[in-house]
């Protein structure tokens, strides 16, 4: 499964994604099978990632990376078509309802609001809507922890929101990013301690419009030494 933490700081969006891959057996058991997954995928306009079933996530992420999109509605159509195809192919699976409920997509792109450039973060999650995308507004945080109960997810999100709100309200602008990233690493470590499907190691991306910088394989103990530009490489 996956744990993804998101903070919209106004000028930029920060996304932390853990690196664990988990296989779900026929009886529903979750078996960790690696900590090297790069879940943040660069697109021409930002990044796309997700949590849940790889069979649904990967086709949409690949389309966004390779084809690009000029409207979020294009990505929504890919998501809905993928969910439909997956449902038809696994109509008799006892895990179908759970796979659909636990799989979510999220992506960024630049836009303009009131003549001002804005980095938009949108997501699709069945709990919020089965037909439309949701927008994360400035100053807000969001968590997508795979395999968590609703109560656990809400508690984690409340902790991240507290970090983001305090940083934005009390710190100089040049200290906000570092503080939020540090808080994300702490929360990722705490989550990994209570969930075997989440790793404490994560990749962290900072997105400002079309510009994406990334820090790879960081933990609470080693911290972020530097962010480097994340290149967009579409399949040939």
Image (cartoon, helix red, strand yellow):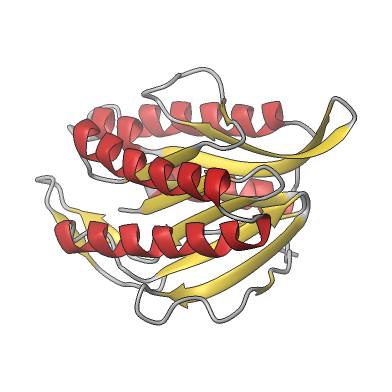
Can you give x and y, in whole percent of width and height, for residue 132 in the image?
55, 20
Is residue 24 shown above or below 152? below
Q: Position of residue 105 (x, y in %)?
A: 50, 40
Q: Nearer the viewer, residue 169 or 198?
A: 169
In the image, is residue 216 above or below residue 44?
A: below
Quick one: 76 or 40, which is closer to the camera?
Answer: 40
Q: Quadrant of residue 41?
A: bottom right
Instruction: Kindly identify the residue that appears in the image at 56 percent across and 72 percent down.
Output: 215
Q: Evaluate whether residue 52 shows in this view.
A: no
Q: Position of residue 33 (x, y in %)?
A: 25, 69
The C terminus sits in image quarter: bottom right
Q: Residue at x 11, y 51 (%)?
A: 29
Residue 6 is left or right of residue 114, and the answer is left
Inspect this view and state whether residue 116 appears.
yes
Quadrant hosting residue 235: bottom right
Going by the image, does 106 lie left or right of 211? left
Rendered location of residue 82, percent (x, y): 50, 34
Residue at (66, 44) in percent of width and height: 108
Q: Residue at x 36, y 73 (%)?
A: 220
Towards the viewer: 203 or 173: 173
């Amino acid at each position: 499964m996956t744990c993804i933490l998101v903070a919209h700081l106004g000028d930029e969006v920060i996304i932390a994604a853990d690196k664990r891959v988990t296989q779900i057996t026929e009886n529903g058991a979750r078996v960790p099978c690696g900590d090297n997954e790069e879940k943040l995928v660069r697109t021409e306009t930002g990044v796309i990632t997700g949590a849940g079933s790889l069979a649904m996530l990967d086709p949409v992420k690949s389309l966004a990376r390779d084809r690009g999109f000029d409207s979020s509605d294009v990505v929504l159509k890919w998501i809905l078509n993928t969910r439909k195809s997956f449902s038809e192919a696994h109509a008799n699976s006892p895990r179908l309802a759970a796979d659909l409920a636990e799989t979510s997509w999220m992506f960024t792109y630049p836009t303009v609001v009131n003549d001002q450039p804005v980095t938009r973060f949108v997501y699709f999650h069945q709990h919020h809507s089965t037909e439309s995308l949701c927008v994360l507004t400035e100053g807000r945080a969001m968590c997508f922890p795979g395999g968590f109960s609703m109560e656990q997810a809400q508690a984690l999100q409340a902790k991240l929101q507290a970090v983001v709100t305090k940083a934005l309200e009390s710190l100089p602008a040049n200290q906000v990013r570092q503080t939020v990233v540090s808080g994300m690493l702490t929360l990722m470590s705490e989550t990994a301690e209570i969930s075997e499907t989440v790793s404490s190691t994560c990749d962290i991306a900072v997105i400002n419009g079309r510009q994406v910088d990334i820090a790879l394989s960081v933990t609470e103990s080693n911290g972020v030494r530097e962010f480097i530009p994340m290149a967009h490489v579409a399949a040939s």
